[in-house]
Image (spheres, helix red, strand yellow):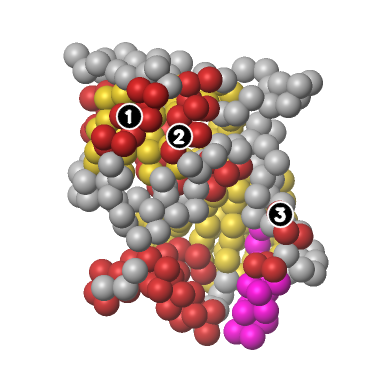
């Protein structure tokens, strides 16, 4: 039986795919009085199989080190149980860690794990696949797929590939037809982009794209209105700078479950930055308080019940 806290690490997470050092991670855990069993996942290795092997030994805690995709891959096996997730944000954007206020520095993130403060958060689900942050259909999955192609075939780094893919997508923001079914009522939409968040996202100002919490038991859905290339580019600029109002740019909903019937039977759907093909209808639901995770202690008087 392996000794120490299981720490499953993506070897090549991060903006430039730099290697993550198992020795450095082990030393950081030891500095906080903990022994870590660091399992480094190389490209092509199956994280799901690694998690299953770890869980067979019955640990109370499993730590995931990597970006949002890695955190998602580990968390998906810990739902509705007693095993707690620890987070080492080693990726490019680290949305889940950011919204939980987990520091991005490894040593400080391990300090949060050592402190042992457990909270319970909601998880979103689409056609049986979970998302900790968000899921989307349309423009964003197309950008991700093209970015990956640029990295693979042109040898571009993640950021140059993303810029190239984004420019190409915004140059011709094609719409698709979607029938959104909420509480038995159908709404027809023509849109370039549907965004579904695990809990409510801030959509105005400098905090745009962040969440205040993940325990309200709702999904947020934003359906973007059709836009031409210049208007789409200006929307992106305003979003990045946190200026102006976006109230007229989309229809928004707070709901617990719904489904989308699309014109194509096979649809690209993004979940926490990873793109998968799913069959229509695309069914979304919230799974309230489904995941235990270690997070910073809240300010006095604001403690969450576990």
Residue drawn 69% across and 22% down?
304
Q: Is residue 158 magenta?
A: no
Where residue 250 sits: x, y (%)? 71, 65
Q: Is residue 145 visible?
A: no
Q: CA distance from mark 1 to mark 2?
A: 10 Å
Residue 18 left/right relative to 263: left
How packed mark 1 is, by other alpha carbons closer than 10 Å (few <14, some 14-19, many 20 or more), is: some
Which residue lies most toward the front here? 31
Q: Earlier in the sequence, mark 1 or mark 3?
A: 1
C-beta proximity under 8 Å, tags 1 and 2 = no
Nearer-the-camera pick, 120 or 279: 120
Seen in the picture, residue 44 relative to 144 is either above or below; the reply is: above
Q: Is residue 236 magenta?
A: yes
Q: Which residue is mark 1?
A: 27
Q: Which residue is mark 3?
A: 207
Q: Earlier in the sequence, mark 2 or mark 3?
A: 2
């Amino acid at each position: 039986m392996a000794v120490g806290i299981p720490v499953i690490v993506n070897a090549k997470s991060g903006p430039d795919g730099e290697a993550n050092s198992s020795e450095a991670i082990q030393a950081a855990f030891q500095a906080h009085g903990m022994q870590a069993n660091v399992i480094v996942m190389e490209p092509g290795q199956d994280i799901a199989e690694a998690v299953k092997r770890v869980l067979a030994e019955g640990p109370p805690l499993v730590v995931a080190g990597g970006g949002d995709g890695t955190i998602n891959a580990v968390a998906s096996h810990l739902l509705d149980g007693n095993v707690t997730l620890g987070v080492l944000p080693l990726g490019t954007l680290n949305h889940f860690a950011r919204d939980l206020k987990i520091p991005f520095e490894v040593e400080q993130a391990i300090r949060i794990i050592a402190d042992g403060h457990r909270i319970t958060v909601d998880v979103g689900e689409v056609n049986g696949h979970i998302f900790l942050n968000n899921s989307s259909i349309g423009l964003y999955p197309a950008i991700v797929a093209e970015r990956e192609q640029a990295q693979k075939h042109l040898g571009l780094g993640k950021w140059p590939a993303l810029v190239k893919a984004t420019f190409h997508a915004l140059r011709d923001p094609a719409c698709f037809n979607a029938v959104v079914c909420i509480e038995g009522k159908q709404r027809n939409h023509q849109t370039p982009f549907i965004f579904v968040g695990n809990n409510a996202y801030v959509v105005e100002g400098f905090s745009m794209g962040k969440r205040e919490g993940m325990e309200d038991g709702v999904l947020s859905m934003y359906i973007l209105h059709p836009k031409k290339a210049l208007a789409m580019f200006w929307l992106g600029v305003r979003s990045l700078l946190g200026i102006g109002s976006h109230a007229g740019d989309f229809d928004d909903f707070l709901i617990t479950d719904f489904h989308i019937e699309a014109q194509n039977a096979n649809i690209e759907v993004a979940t926490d930055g990873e793109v998968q093909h799913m069959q229509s209808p695309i069914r979304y639901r919230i799974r309230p308080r489904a995941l235990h995770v270690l997070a910073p202690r809240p300010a006095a008087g604001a403690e969450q019940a576990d």
